Image (cartoon, rainbow, N blue to C red):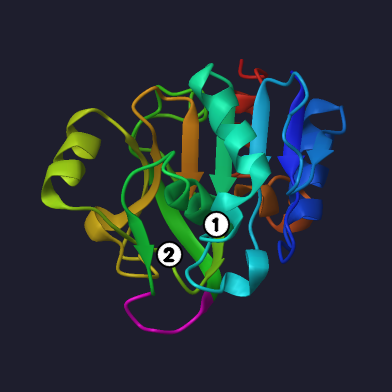
Amino acid sequence: MKSAVVLLPGLNRDRDMIAALTKISGHKPATVWETDTTIPDVDLIVIPGGFSYGDYLRCGAIAARMPVMRAVAEKAKKGVLVMGVCNGFQILVEAGLLPGALMRNASLKFVCREVKLSVANANTAFTRSYRPGQVIRCPVSHHDGNFFADPETLARLEGEGQVVFRYAEGTNPNGSINDIAGIVDRGGNVLGMMPHPENLIEPAHGGSDGRPLFESVLGLAA
């Protein structure tokens, strides 16, 4: 499976994401820049975490309006898999590719620690290597990860199985409604999540709970 990583000024997890994709797939992903208007013929596009454009205006607001995001949206409409992690999730929301909003953490403090996630939907391209309800470890590092959606949108997300990850066992680090940590769009090919699975894929990281997500999306699931 071919993949591409979007590069934007201020992102700082691009190398981690590229390393994870390379180690697990055996192929280094292509990279695309903010001003690119086209994206190579790939099966997966990833927007990594960080602080694009210094988080000015709102997290992800400027990045969402860059030419490359129009190209991402076009690919997503054609069914290409798109994954946004942390700031990437914020960018996808700002670009209108995912519903809801990501607000300041309820504590108004930056959080950087490990949390536990429950797999709310294991029947997606991103989670098929997990078991339904499986609890995994995953690190978070953000200031604006408090997911919110109006009652109608929230009911649709819950009713249509679009919530794929929840913070588990009282580890919600940001006040996110319904403990939501990750969602997919209605088509199931666009994922946004605040935790960083790319930072827990091998023993050197202290665990590999994030690896099945990459094996799922890269078509390596057993």
Residue carrying label 1: 86
Q: Where is residue 197 in the image (x, y as percent from the top left)?
A: 60, 48
Q: Distance between the residues labelled 1 and 2?
A: 8 Å
Q: Nearer the viewer, residue 69 or 120?
A: 69
Q: Nearer the viewer, residue 204 or 119?
A: 119
Q: Left or right: 30 with respect to 113?
A: right
Q: What is the magenta segment's predominant secondary structure? A: loop
Q: Position of residue 218 (x, y in %)?
A: 67, 24
Q: Left or right: 135 with respect to 3?
A: left
Residue appearing at x 86%, y 27% in the figure = 26
Q: In this view, does 131 lie above or below 100?
A: above
Q: Where is residue 91 in the image (x, y as percent from the top left)?
A: 53, 52
Q: Left or right: 117 with respect to 3?
A: left
Residue appearing at x 12%, y 50% in the figure = 151
What is the three-letter code of the residue carrying label 1?
A: Cys
Q: What element carries label 2?
A: loop
Residue appearing at x 42%, y 29% in the figure = 131
- Magenta stretch? 105-111
Q: Left or right: 50 with respect to 123?
A: right
Q: What element carries label 1?
A: loop
Residue appearing at x 31%, y 51% in the figure = 100
Can residue 194 be seen in the rendering of this structure? Answer: no
Q: In this view, does 114 lie above or below 124?
A: below
Residue 146 occupies quadrant: bottom left
